[in-house]
Image (cartoon, rainbow, N blue to C red):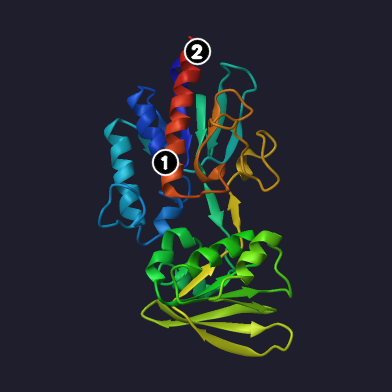
Amino acid sequence: MEDNILDCVIVGSGPAGFTAAIYAARADLKPELFTGLEPGGQLTTTTEVDNFPGYPNGITGPEMMMDLQKQAERFETKVHYEMITKAEFSQEVGGVHKLWAGNREILAKTVIISTGATAKYLGLDDEKKYMGGGVSACATCDGFFYKGKDVIVVGAGDTAAEEATYLAKLVNKVTILVRKDYMRASKAMIHRVNNTANIEVKFNHELTGIEGENNLVERGVVINNQTQETSKIDVHGIFIAIGHKPNTEVFKGQIDLDENGYINTIPGSSKTNLPGVFAVGDVQDSHYRQAITAAGSGCMGAMDAEKYLGELV
């Protein structure tokens, strides 16, 4: 039985998961990583990554994930292109955690969860068509590419207000489309939006389509939901800022989540409320959501797992 129990299983494959694998493998934990449905995570939908240290000329998201995977595999991480569909976590220190990939049962002493979060989109076909060609869900990641240009931000909460004020420093003009007749962002953020000269807020307006050439955004099609009047706004970038959904469905009811579904970790660590279960990257970080912070927390997860296993002996 002992032979079947792995020291470390990593669930998810973005920068957090692969960094955890690199550190865990170097610590001789012989990690096995399950990629999930989207090997490489959110970064595989990002065309250019210009803000990850060590790439002076930038790199594409998919290339960067392949580099990370190769590095993890160099230290003998076993990568499974499978999705974990069920989990039964032990409550005991030193207990064995059970995971399932389809019908296959996996036993592990430690589990590092790095399943990430998925940006919410409006569900327009055009969003998929122009993804990476002007449609984005991350101003910090992609804002730089729109220097001096006009952009749209869709959303009404703090995320939208933050994205808009960040973009306003880089671009010529930001138009915020708000579905209702008010923003639900905090008063401080609304104040910041109202005091930024190159931001225009259009209330009761929704994005209904995107137009462009060669898969590059040239304009947004919008409707005034009060008058039903449609119009077009010439822009090069459209930022969807309606929030993120952490990928924690499979762990619900077993692990402590916050009100938005993110895994709660003990501050300054990757530890969850369960012994031997750790959470890293965007699945537990609703604030920073950057590749570099995810990678850093992946390192923490592996080190925390190594320490936990060391204390069991």
State the image coordinates of residue 45 (x, y, percent, origin top left): 42, 59
The answer to whether 203 appears left or right of 44 in the picture is right
Going by the numbered disc 2, the residue's amino acid type is: Glu
Q: Residue at x 61, y 39 (%)?
A: 263
Tell me what residue is drawn at x 39 percent, y 71 percent. 147
Residue 235 visible at all:
yes
Residue designated by label 2:
311
Residue at x-position 39% and y-position 37%: 19
x and y percentages locating residue 79 in the rendered image: 37, 38
- Residue 40 falls left or right of residue 119: left
Q: In which quadrant of the rendered view does residue 242 lie?
A: bottom right
Q: Residues within 10 Å of mark 2 (few under 14, many from 20)?
A: few
Would residue 59 appear left or right of 260 to someone viewing this image? left
Name, please, the residue furthest toward the top. 313
Which secondary structure lies at badge 2? helix
Question: Which label sits on residue 53?
Answer: none
Residue 193 image-quadrant placement = bottom right
**Between discs 1 and 2, the one toward the N terminus:** 1
The residue indicated by pointer 1 is 295
**CA gap, disc 1 to disc 2?**
25 Å
In the displayed structure image, the side of residue 224 where residue 105 appears, left or right: left
Q: Label 1 sits on what residue type?
A: Ala
Residue at disc 1, secondary structure: helix
